[in-house]
Amino acid sequence: MSADDKPGPVRPEWPLYEVFVRGKRGLNHVHVGSLHAPDEQMALHNARNLYTRRNEGVSIWVVRAEDITASSPDEKDPFFEPSGDKVYRHPTFYPVPEDVPHI
Amino acid sequence: MTTTAGEAPPEADRALQADFDTKVAAKQRIEPRDWMPEGYRKSLVRQIAQHAHSEIIGMQPEGDWIASAPSLRRKAILLAKVQDEAGHGLYLYAAAETLGVDRAELTERLIDGRQKYSSIFNYPSLTYADVGVIGWLVDGAAICNQVPLCRTSFGPYARAMVRICKEESFHQRQGYELLMRMMEGTRSQRRTVQEAVDRWWWPSLMMFGPPDADSPNTQQSLEWGIKIDTNDALRRKFVDMTVPQADKLGVTLPDPELVWNEDSGQYDFGEPDWNEFKQVVSGNGPCNAERVARRRAAHEEGAWVREAATAYANKHRNTQEVAV
């Protein structure tokens, strides 16, 4: 799950992959969990067996956990501040009379 | 990842602790890279690992019957169920790994006897009715335990529990349906079901852990949101859920003190044999040695498969690099 600063395994282990599943056509791939596998192909097969035993998906992505770059964990981080004060990005910022149709 | 407490100056540490406490109190989830108290991390690792080990060891009592299933239908069902248990173990090991431990290390701790698993899996499954009763009572008790844990404070653990609970429902129903079918059979088949119920009832009640008075960590775990209900509360809930199911099935539960209490609106029931529980937890149950030995054998005898897969992956990678 955490991509960048996980302590290394105590012995040579299969690398960690994060698994993303598209539930059905038209939906985004969503992170569902992780697994270990010796390579990408076996990671895909393991993910099929582990995360889609009951038709949970139509498409799977696997990504080496160490290849993911993540933002800081704290949601109050200044990283997200630029969007905090821009209320004019939301439709509710603009009052429109109730009797104006279709808007 | 976890920030270790020792590195930060005391005032920064207090701010982190306060922030953590606020999140937990507001029922927000703690995620792996958030700061968390070391005790919280350790308790979670122990709890999730124990839970994962239980799923993996839990494959054995039922796995014993796969080759002797009475029909192809039952065999397919049992295979799917045991495969689910493996999957549940893997979801949970993955959740534990987000806390900075290594799955291989957890497996070592299990087969060295340094970490425990649920006491229930140290009992033998003597007949096919045991497969049904394990589904009905053991998975029923597990569901009772696990549904509240879908709201536990640690995000990856809660998400794993959501997946697991969805799948457990099939486990319980297939068990109950198997027993209903057997109860339609001969007198001997009905007796087999009743005897299996008699064997598993008390161990199932023990799955909720010792009485609250003997469970010193409960209070802290409740405050941290890694436990949602006390052992006794869950045990009581399980009894209330199960008695009508037993009536409908036509079996009796082997507890002479089990009686409806009009005043409390719940069942009164007897005390499990806590000495037996202590014995089984400390390694002296009927199957402890066998279960761990089998897990060790599977791990050690499977080493060549893991090595071969690694060798294949390396060879494949090298070939690709040459071709580029």
Image (spheres, rainbow, N blue to C red):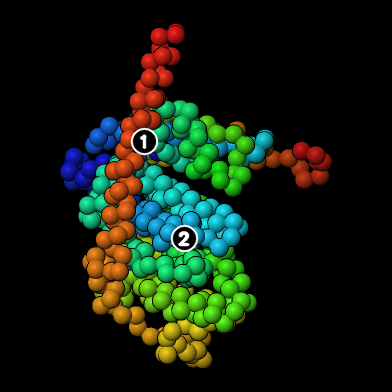
Q: In whole angstroms, how far apart are the C-alphas of marks 1 and 2? A: 25 Å
Residue B153 in the image: state x and y as whole percent: 40, 54
* Residue B6 as seen in the image, left or right of residue B173: left
Residue B305, which numbered label? 1
Residue B210 in the image: state x and y as whole percent: 31, 73
Give the answer, above or below, for where B17 lies relative to B204. above
User: Residue at image x 41%, y 50%?
Assistant: B89
Instruction: Determine the secondary structure under disc 1.
Output: helix
Is residue B231 among what the camera can see?
A: no
Give the answer, above or below, for where B262 lies relative to B106. below
Q: Which residue is mark 2?
A: B65
Chain letter for the residue marked with disc 2 in the picture? B
User: Residue at image x 58%, y 73%?
Assistant: B182
Is residue B79 among what the camera can see?
A: yes
Residue A80 in the image: state x and y as whole percent: 45, 34
Evaluate if marks 1 and 2 touch, with contact meaning CB atoms under 8 Å apart. no
- Circle 2: residue type: Trp
Q: Nearer the viewer, residue B293 or B141?
A: B293
Residue B93 in the image: state x and y as whole percent: 37, 47
Chain letter for the residue marked with disc 1 in the picture? B
Image quadrant assignment for residue B213: bottom left
* Residue B121 as seen in the image, left or right of residue A20: left
User: Residue at image x 57%, y 54%?
Assistant: B76
The quadrant of the image that shows the C terminus of chain B is: top left
Work out whether mark 1 precedes mark 2 in sequence or the reverse, and give the earlier one: 2
Instruction: Determine the secondary structure under disc 2.
Output: loop
